[in-house]
Amino acid sequence: MAAKSKTKKQTGVDQRLVKALAHPLRVEILTILNERMASPNELSKELEEGLSQVSYHVKVLKDFECIEMVKTEPRRGAVEHYYRATARAFLSDKDWQKLPASIKPGMSASFVKMLIDDVAGALKGGTFDARDDRHISWTPGTVDEQGWKESVDLVNETLERAMAIHTGSAKRLAKSGEEGIPATVVLMNFEGVAPLAKSSKGAKKSKSKRASKRA
């Protein structure tokens, strides 16, 4: 019986995290608090949202035990509370499949928005092209069902490797005391929109342009 209960716990979706991710603003807040400690006031300014609204969603995240308060500081006659995440804003493929279809588009849109904001910030701050070995590529194409499954496996394997690299780096940085490098790895594998029918000449030209592109 104990083994069965343990399996259920390992394979089931963390309902607190699911509820936390059900609102796009909470997704953004939780993602930021995964990266660093912040107060509702700081989050409000960064996300350009009202303080009362941000404070409400911070409270919800705290109630769901997705974040915890780590310190307080006096600010202009008041006390500012600082929080950090206790759970990663991450769902496995199996978790995602179990989510209600109604909340998936909002969650996906929120993640894409955060990605765009992150890239825009790096471009504006001059860090995006600071390293010659940085990578950016776009590889659209057409696959069959087997190819789709192979693409999914490839992305999952790369994700696991990226997380292992981050974990190893964190341990080494803790020992060395050196300053870390903010590094973002973005992985996407989604079904695109089929192109409109074109003439044979146009289709041939389009095909040559749709090859893997790397800047």
Image: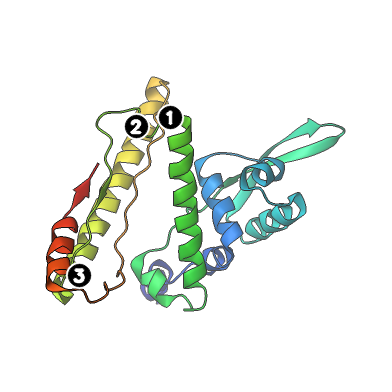
Precedes in sequence: disc 3 or disc 1:
1
**Residue nearer the viewer, 2 or 131:** 131
Say which element carries label 2: loop
Task: Say if mark 1 contacts mark 2, CB within 8 Å.
Answer: yes
Question: Which disc is residue 206 wearing?
Answer: none
Say which element carries label 3: helix
Decide if residue 108 is on the left or right side of residue 209. right
**Residue nearer the viewer, 89 or 113:** 113
Mark 2: amino acid: Asp
Q: Residue at x 51, y 46 (%)?
A: 34
Q: Which residue is mark 3?
A: 149
Q: Is residue 89 visible?
A: no
Q: Which residue is mark 1?
A: 126
Q: Alpha-carbon neighbours of circle 3 within 10 Å: few (<14), some, or many (≥20)?
A: few
Query: Where, quadrant-wise, is the N terminus in this rendering?
Result: bottom left
Q: Which residue is mark 2?
A: 129
Q: Residue at x 57, y 56 (%)?
A: 66
- Residue 33: % across, % down: 56, 45
Precedes in sequence: disc 2 or disc 3:
2
Say which element carries label 1: loop
